Amino acid sequence: MADREEEHMRGVDATRRQAWRRLWRGAGLVISGAMLMVGGWCIGTLQNRSANVLAATPTGQLSSQLTTQKVMIIGGSMAHGWKDPNNDSYLKRAFAALSNSTDTQYAYDDRTVVGGSPVGLDKSGKYATWLAEDKPQIVVISWGLLNDVFDKTPMAAFSQAIHDEIQEALAANAVVIFVTSPVTKATATYNHAEVENYIALEQQQASSFDNPNIYFIDLNHDMSVYMAAHGQTWQQYYGDSWHPNEAGHELAGELLFDDFIETFGTGPIEWQDPGAGDTANQGSGGGGTADTSA
């Protein structure tokens, strides 16, 4: 791996950046027991998404008491935060922003495996152990997929491992959120097609479960569209060929935060009754669709 290097955000709109940094660095909510009024949320165009998140649309209320939810993160070095000076990954940033701006506090449980892959984790048996020990309400699956590209992981083996990850999380009554990885040189150029093939398999497996507790957020696509809208490329966010730098994690975290608000609103990310049928134990041919944001 190349030595850690830092780059400052370039070409990102100053107003949006300042708003994000205030959110990231700001203190958590202070709840005194009185109901706090907040503006509703809306998502603007990708050109000024974060500037519009706090727009004054129909008002709502935050709870007078904080809710705590544990979120377990599954993924590799990108999800862990490589090339960010403090390993503050896009995922950690997004959930910290949610904790700072909603009435839910997210306890961040980093179970990433640097150099790992879905098949390797499946074979190790550690995932089931973590679920039993940690008892998360939310499982975020965010593999960078470049290890699978490099290892030429067979599609059938990859698909089965993803299926097992979903099935075991649902059996533990955990909401499953797939988040594709941020844009890097490799995902944008010479490994783009292979990464997209693995992403398609992830989405197919997510859709195969007839369960409302599975969500799919294509952050890689979202970030690609954002960069194109701003005349940017992966070069502004280069940590190394496989990882974004600090600015890349920051931008990806901001976009993911927007996606979370768009998908879940300002309330907690809660388990929904899947209805009739034992979807946690069904086979890969089960039907249904995952919620998609991109």
Image (spheres, helix red, strand yellow):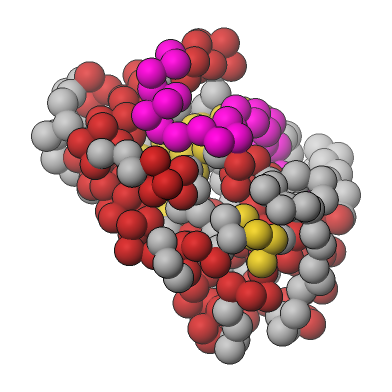
**Residue 239 as seen in the image, left or right of residue 130:** right
Q: Is residue 33 above or below residue 200?
A: above
Residue sitting at 66 percent across and 67 percent down? 238
| Residue 73: quadrant of the picture | top right
Count of marks placed on residues: 0
Residue sitting at 86 percent across and 40 percent down? 32
- The location of residue 102, given as percent across then percent down, is 68, 49
Nearest the viewer among 135 and 199 is: 199
Asked whether residue 111 is drawn in magenta, I would say: yes
**Residue 21 as seen in the image, left or right of residue 173:** right
Q: Quadrant of the C terminus?
A: bottom left
| Residue 10: quadrant of the picture | bottom right
Q: Can see residue 128? A: no
Q: Which residues are magenta?
A: 97-125
Residue sitting at 53 percent across and 16 percent down? 130
| Residue 287: quadrant of the picture | top left
**Residue 26 as seen in the image, left or right of residue 231:** right
- The location of residue 174, given as percent across then percent down, is 44, 27
Asked whether residue 259 is drawn in magenta, I would say: no
**Residue 27 as seen in the image, left or right of residue 115:** right
Nearest the viewer among 232 and 165 is: 232
Q: Can see residue 156? A: yes
Residue sitting at 47 percent across and 69 percent down? 188
Q: Is residue 197 above or below residue 95?
A: below
- The location of residue 220, given as percent across then percent down, is 47, 62
- The location of residue 264, given as percent across then percent down, is 49, 51
